[in-house]
Each structure stands twice: as C-alpha cells, then as structure tokens.
Image: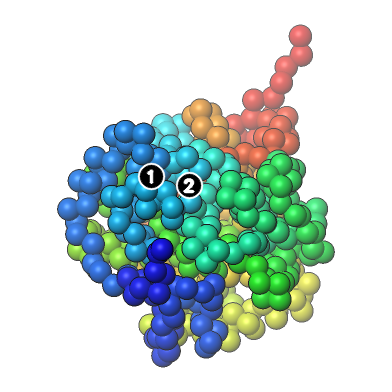
Amino acid sequence: MLDIMAEHAVKKCINPDCGKSYGIDNDTYRCTCGSLLDIQYSKKPSRDLIERFYQRRNHGGNIYNESGVWRFRDLINFAGIDTEDFNECARTLVSLDGSEGRLSKPYNMSKAADYADMNHDSFFLQPEGYNPSGSFKDNGMSTAVTHAKMLKVKKIICASTGNTSASAAMYAANEDIQCDVYIPKGEIAPGKLGQAFQFGAQVIQVQGNFDDALATSLKNAKETGGYTVNSVNPFRIEGQKTIVYRVMEQLNWNPPDWIVYPGGALGNTSSCGKALIELYEWGWIKKVPRIAVVNAEGANTLYELYNGMFEGKKLSWNDGRPDLGMVDRYYADLDKRGIRPKTHATAIQIGRPANIVKALRALHFTNGVVVQATDKEMSDGMSIVGLNGFDCEMASGAVPAGVRKLRKEGTIKKDDVVVGILTGRQKDPSLAVEYHMHADNMFARPPTSH
C-alpha cells in the first residue's frame, strides 16, 4: 500500500512570511494564511535523468513512457513510487493510455513565422491541442486525478470555460469517478460543452462568468467534499510543468530565449515559472527563458496591473509580498464600473485569474512581459496557424499575435529562439467560418460560387 504520508513531497505555502508545510494526504490547496501552495520535493533530481527520458521515447509498449507527462515522472514524483516499476506506475498513475502530451512538441511554422516577423528556424509553436481532450488541460488533469485517486475521492469538481470541463470529465470517466462541472451559462463553445456531456459529467450552469462559476464550485466542493481540479490545485500545476520539459527536450535542453503563453487563469504561466525555477535551482539549465503572457484585450487584468495601468503603480512579486490590496481595489473598480471580461476567445475570458500571485513569481524570475491582443488580432493568429496545417483555438491565436507585437516594439529580436504554446484546438468552428466569410480579414479565404 502506498504511504502518502511519506515526506518525499509536501505542500508548501508560497508566502515567505508564512512558509507553512502540509502533507499530501489531503486536498488542501490553500494555506490557512490564504496563500496558494506549491508541491515541494525533498530530493534534487540528477541531470543524468535526461538520458533516461530519451530512452523512454522508445516506449516498448509502456504507456507511462509513451505519455508526454509520465515520461518525466521522476521530476513530478509526488506519489513516491519506484518510477521504473511498471506495476507500481499502473497502480498509482492516471493516464489515458499514454496519450496525454504524447504528440505535443515544438514545430517550425514558416507562415506563422513570417506573420510574426521571426526567422523560420528559430520560431516554434507547440500545439497542445493534440492532447486527447484537445487542450493543454490533460497535462495537469492526469496529475490532479492521480492525487485524487491516491486520496480515494469519489467526485472531482471544476469550474470551466470549456477545456477544463472536457478534460476533467474525460479523466473522471476513465477512472470511474463522478465529475461535476460548473460553467458560465451561455459562455462556453458548444464543442467543449458537448465533450463534458459526452463523458458523463454533471453540468451545473451558473449565471455570470467563469469567475462566478469558480467561486461557486469552490464553495460547493468545500460543502460536499468534492476534489477541486482547477489550477488552484498544486497537483494540476505539476502536470503542466511537463509542457516546458517537452520544449526543453526538443531543443536538447538548450533553453529558448522566450516561452509565450495565452493568459487566462494563469495556471500555465505559474507552471512554466515553477518548472524554470526548479530546473535552474537543480542546475539543469544555466539560462532562464523569458516568459511572455498574452492577455485578451477584453480580459486583461494581468496586463493592466503588471504594466502599471491602475493607480500608476506596477503590481510585482515583491519578494513574495505582492500588493494584494491593489488587486482587490482593481476588482472593486471593475465592479463599480460594471466591467466584465468579454472576448470571443472564451478560453481566456477570465477577469479574476486565480493564479495571479504565482504568475507574478514566474514573471519576476524570468524578467517576463505581459501584452494584450484584440479579438481581431487573435483571429488573425489563429488563422495563420491554420494555414500552416495546424489547428488552434482563438485563445491560442494570441500567441503569434503577441509575438508579432513584441517584435514590432523590439522586445523580441528576429533571431531570438521563441517557443509559443498553442493551448488548445478549435472547438468552435463558427469562429473560423465567420473569419473566412469576411474578405477584409488578413488571411480570409472566402468561399466562391460556381
């Protein structure tokens, strides 16, 4: 029987003035001081593991070597298993037959590079839409549901703009666990909502937006004993770190100059930062890539706060003591003015990013930047990815659009090595149809009559 009381990993408060630690034999995701928690490991992994990761790519039928998440299980071994023992992996780790992260890696896309004014050979985009449910969420869901399985929970709960609900429902169905998903009514692409229904989730519609759905789901999880699988859960973050590991592996562990993400709840920004901090502290990398976060203009909380557009002062990590009073005042101001997040890129239509503090840490450590893109710019970005033969949703179109902006202002150099993460595939075909029906759009291919 696995002893999850063992201290190979603990949950640790990210507030330096607190620093309280918790065992992992519970579903606590927030410290008593109110701060979020990190998974912290007791042992520093050897860089010799890189060779083992390469060898595992010839998986020989071992689904945990085939998985783009569990291939790196030695770096996220919160369960404390013998990572070379297949039977122990099978008893403990949750996987959809090794499909999570299996196909996602950086690709050169020449047309997207031209659009972003980047050199063809130094600009990469990594499509996480190749995951089984069609988005990056499967990376973190495999680890979160693994922890839920360790705790023998009966029901997982999430709030979602669509992709989280699809992923949670899929993994829950595979593990025969109940799944409740809280969604903002009328704010989810039908393709994503259909997945939640298809995989047997109980859908609960909430009046309001994602922020309202998240607050409701967290309250009900506490009241009913459900296990939260949103990215406030630190085990979700552990799985999402493998996005960075696959970037590094494809580049022979030579870090790029930039890693670029769309910004929604900021779980990806947080996981990227944690991965880079750990790799640097372990001595696995000597250069730290800079993170660029691209907000939708209609849901741009991080952009405004990080760049000093509210109260004339920039919100920063501040050695782990960010001015959270400023964040509260910002939200109160939005409420006073009746401003709600609004963008067709519904995957990042989030006004109160739950991981904003961890994201600030990531941006501080990497000397990161935050930009914003309009819906039209994200649509252009989505479309140029499509013209390279790859699929991505509108929120992912923020990545090439954001790089294009950062090139124009000179922040990114033409020959910088840039890896952008395309977080999900297109699940709302009406967006692509509408884009291409209008000939004045940059990459439109309108239909003709015969």
Q: Residue at x 41, y 82 (%)?
A: 21
Q: Secondary structure at mark 1?
A: helix
Task: Report which residue position mark 1 lands on.
Answer: 64
Give coordinates of residue 275: x percent, y percent.
35, 61
Give coordinates of residue 5: x percent, y percent.
40, 74
> In the rendered view, does 183 fall on the left or right side of 85?
right
Identity, as a three-letter code, of the amino acid under mark 2: Ser
- Name, please, the residue furthest toward the front: 1
Task: Report which residue position mark 2 lands on.
Answer: 95
Mark 1 crowd level (few <14, some 14–19, many ≥20, 10 Å Cα): many
Q: Residue at x 62, y 39 (%)?
A: 426
Q: Is residue 57 visible?
A: yes
- Name, please, the residue furthest toward the top: 450
The circle drawn on residue 272 is: none
> In the rendered view, does 369 fall on the left or right side of 423?
left
Q: Residue at x 53, y 87 (%)?
A: 32
Identity, as a three-letter code, of the amino acid under mark 1: Tyr
- What is the quadrant of residue 22 in the picture? bottom left
Give coordinates of residue 392: x percent, y percent.
56, 39
Q: Is residue 209 above or below residue 441?
A: below
Q: Secondary structure at mark 2?
A: loop
- Name, please, the residue furthest toward the bottom: 17
- What is the quadrant of residue 81 in the picture? bottom left
Q: Is residue 132 above or below residue 215?
A: above
The quadrant of the rendering that contains the N terminus is: bottom left
Of the numbered discs 1 and 2, the one sitting upstream in the chain is: 1
Mark 2 crowd level (few <14, some 14–19, many ≥20, 10 Å Cα): many
The quadrant of the rendering that contains the C terminus is: top right
